[in-house]
Each structure stands twice: as structure tokens, then as C-alpha cells.
Amino acid sequence: MKNLELGKLGERLATLYLLDRGYKLIQANYRSIRWGEIDLIMRDGEVFVFVEVKTRTSVKYGKPEEAVTYHKLRKLRRPINFFVSTNKIRAPMRVDVISILFEGEKHKIEHFKNVMTD
């Protein structure tokens, strides 16, 4: 499976995972031409949740969640801030990471909540 296909599959699985837990999908693949992309924008009750999804087929280069570095989180601030200001969001917000690791035909999903701190 190619990386782009794997990434799209991971985003679909993450969306289903969160929907099953009562989250509401606001937008998938939100893209600001200038600032970048947010994989998923969800609502968890009143909280807006910006989700970064990382999918891997092995841990040869580390666990999927380890690819969400401090630098990556800093880069996410720009599209998040653009979305918030464009949509005049005044609700609580957080950033989550969904890690998906395929092991043959099976996959393991881990959800890391509120990963961004100032």
C-alpha cells in the first residue's frame, strides 16, 4: 500500500473511531493554502478537537505517534489559528493525536488527548 493510500485509510479509521465515541465530524482534511492541513476537526461535546492522524505499517522508524514532534505541533498552530479566526470560534479547543499501527490484517489505534501545551 502506498503512503498516500495508507494515510487516507488511517484518517477514515480515525474518523470512525472518534464517531463511535460520540465525537462529531466538523471537517476532514481542512486545508489552508498558506498554512497547511489539519487531518480532522471534530467536536467532543463543546470542545473543538484538532486531530493529527499518523499511520504506520511497522515500528522500524518508531511508533506512529512519535512522528508528531514538537516541530510538527508548532506547524499545526498556523492552520488551527487560521480556522479559529476564520470561523470565529470561541469554544474550548485541544489537539489530539490518533496513532494507527497495522500488524498484518489487524490494526491498533491509540488516542492521545490534549498533546499541545503552550
Image (spheres, rainbow, N blue to C red):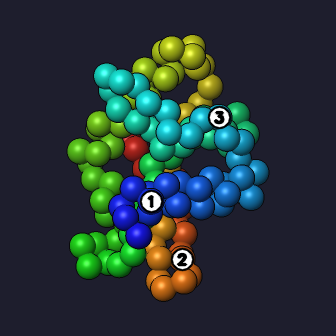
Q: In this view, does 32 lie to the left or right of 41?
A: left
Residue 56: image location, x then y, percent:
39, 69
Q: Is mark 2 on a helix, strand or loop?
A: strand
Please give the name of the residue rendered at 26% of the width and 79% of the height, measured from the top-left corner: 60
Foreground mark, 1 or 2?
1
The image quadrant that residue 3 belongs to is bottom left
Viewer can see residue 68: yes
Q: Name the residue under label 2.
A: 107
Foreground mark, 3 or 1?
1
Q: Which mark is residue 49?
A: none
Q: Mark 3 points at which residue?
A: 26
Q: In this view, does 21 lie to the left or right of 63?
A: right
Q: What element carries label 1?
A: helix
Distance between mark 3 and mark 1 Cα atoms: 22 Å
Quadrant in the picture for the C terminus: top left
Camera-side residue of 116 and 68: 68
Residue 79: image location, x then y, percent:
40, 28
Mark 1 touches mark 2? (CB < 8 Å): no
Give the amino acid at mark 3.
Answer: Ile
Q: Mark 1 points at which residue?
A: 5
Residue 59: image location, x then y, percent:
32, 78
Instruction: Specify which label sits upstream in the sequence, 1 or 2.
Output: 1
Please give the name of the residue rendered at 30% of the width and 59% of the height, measured from the top-left corner: 67
Q: What element carries label 3?
A: strand
Give the amino acid at mark 2.
Answer: His
Please give the name of the residue rendered at 39% of the width and 56% of the height, measured from the top-left corner: 4
Please give the name of the residue rendered at 48% of the width and 15% of the height, measured from the top-left corner: 85
Mark 3 touches mark 2? (CB < 8 Å): no
Residue 110, relative to residue 84: is it above or below?
below
Instruction: Specify which label sits upstream in the sequence, 3 or 1.
Output: 1
Quadrant in the picture for the N terminus: bottom left
